[in-house]
Amino acid sequence: MRSRFPKGVSVLLRILGLLCGLLTALAARDLLAWLLARPKIRLPALACLLHEVAINGPGILRRAVNDFSLWRLIEYPVITQMLDLQPGAWVLDIGSGTSSYPLMLAREGATVVLAELDEERVRWQRDKLAAQGGIRGTMYPVVADATALPFRDAAFGRVSAISSIEHIPDDRAVGREIGRVLRPGGVAAISVPYTFGERESFFAGIRDFARVGRNEFRQVGKGGLVRFYTDDDVEQRFGPPVGCHITERCYFGRRILNDGYHETRLTRYWNTLVLKDLLLAWTVHPLEEALLRHTEPFDVMFRLERARD
Ligand SMILES: C[S@@+](CC[C@H](N)C(=O)[O-])C[C@H]1O[C@@H](n2cnc3c(N)ncnc32)[C@H](O)[C@@H]1O
């Protein structure tokens, strides 16, 4: 049958149709994985987005009110998988900020203790919790310093720390505290910025960061610290010296998502259009991990296990 449209337009329509089909298939796969994964707690990217909308309202799709973004849509699913949680499990989340991640886990049935230094942010988390109706698990927001946690030895079977330890000056103390509060055989899942060896710059495209040490940067005028970790740094801070061993590592944010997106002026739109971030997490992230493994990633996510005594 002859098309009513000029040839160029009908080719474009066909490509759009294929793209929509692909995205629908990816959404269906994510949804199916989520539904079939019970009773294990799984948070595929689509589920994270649905939780965010339930917690913060649909406005989150246009403009995130917290750190929710492309990076979190990659981190939350992997970190949750590494934690290997069943409903009812206790998790300590370190440096939660105003992230919805602890509440997402609680909505899925976990009991989450969040340890955050900033009182305002802990209040924000308490308010969010109070506004939730009928969640399956629960959450205990605590003002606490990750370098001196107010919990007894071996108190937790699971610990998460998502993009938080790189901002803490004494990260060795945090590693020791994670080793201390994890019970033997317990698991932590952590994400931090990564480098093969040495980073000369950070956010070259849009914000001004001064180099203040090997792989350490501070935002000019603000002072917030960001640190990049090599594989050796990860071993030294979170491995054998603190009684743990690293059992898994995954990376993200390579040539396209980091060099071509995150570290350029495009980050001006960083907090906008979360749906675009979902599409990037679904499509570009797996492609990068399949094809660009030789290029430097922006972050590493790793799983560590506390040695059994
Ligand atoms: C980038 S935010 C965390 C992002 C969050 N985990 C997420 O999933 O989006 C880093 C957080 O670490 C917190 N923080 C900094 N130093 C800390 C410390 N010593 N103990 C606990 N939290 C700390 C900061 O207040 C901030 O809220």
Image (cartoon, grey):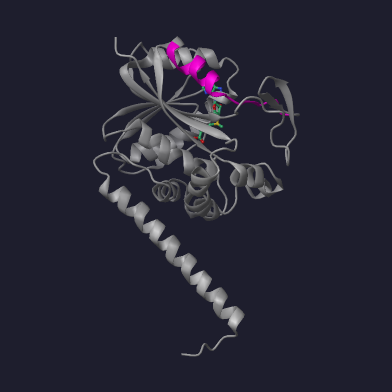
Q: How many marks?
A: 0
- For the C terminus, give its image quadrant: top left
- In the image, what residue occupies the spot 45% across and 50% down? 53
The answer to if 111 sits in the magenta stretch is: no
Q: Relative to the observer, which residue lies in front, 112 or 205?
A: 205
Q: Is residue 251 left or right of residue 202?
A: left
Mark yes or no: residue 60 visible.
no
Give the camera-side residue of 188 and 254: 254
Camera-side residue of 185 and 104:
185
Most distant residue in the left direction: 39
Q: Which residue lies at the image location 24% right of the left edge and 40% below the top edge?
A: 39
Query: Is 232 covered by the magenta stretch?
Result: yes
Residue 4 lies in what quarter of the image?
A: bottom right
Residue 7: give x, y in percent of width and height. 59, 83
Query: Residue 14's x, y, as percent?
Result: 51, 74
Q: Residue at x 69, y 25 (%)?
A: 217
Q: Is residue 295 rendered to the left or right of residue 160?
A: right
Q: Is residue 20 above or below residue 46?
A: below
* In-image side of 109 versus 122 (left or right): left
Quadrant location of ligand 1? top right
Where is 25 relative to 36, above or below? Answer: below
| Left or right, 96 with reference to 270 | left
Q: Position of residue 95 (x, y in %)?
A: 50, 26
The span picked out in magenta is: 222-240
**Front-most of residues 263 and 86:** 263
Q: Position of residue 191 (x, y in %)?
A: 49, 30
User: Within the image, what quadrant is residue 216 found in?
Assistant: top right
Residue 30 vertical position relative to residue 232 in the rendered view, above or below: below
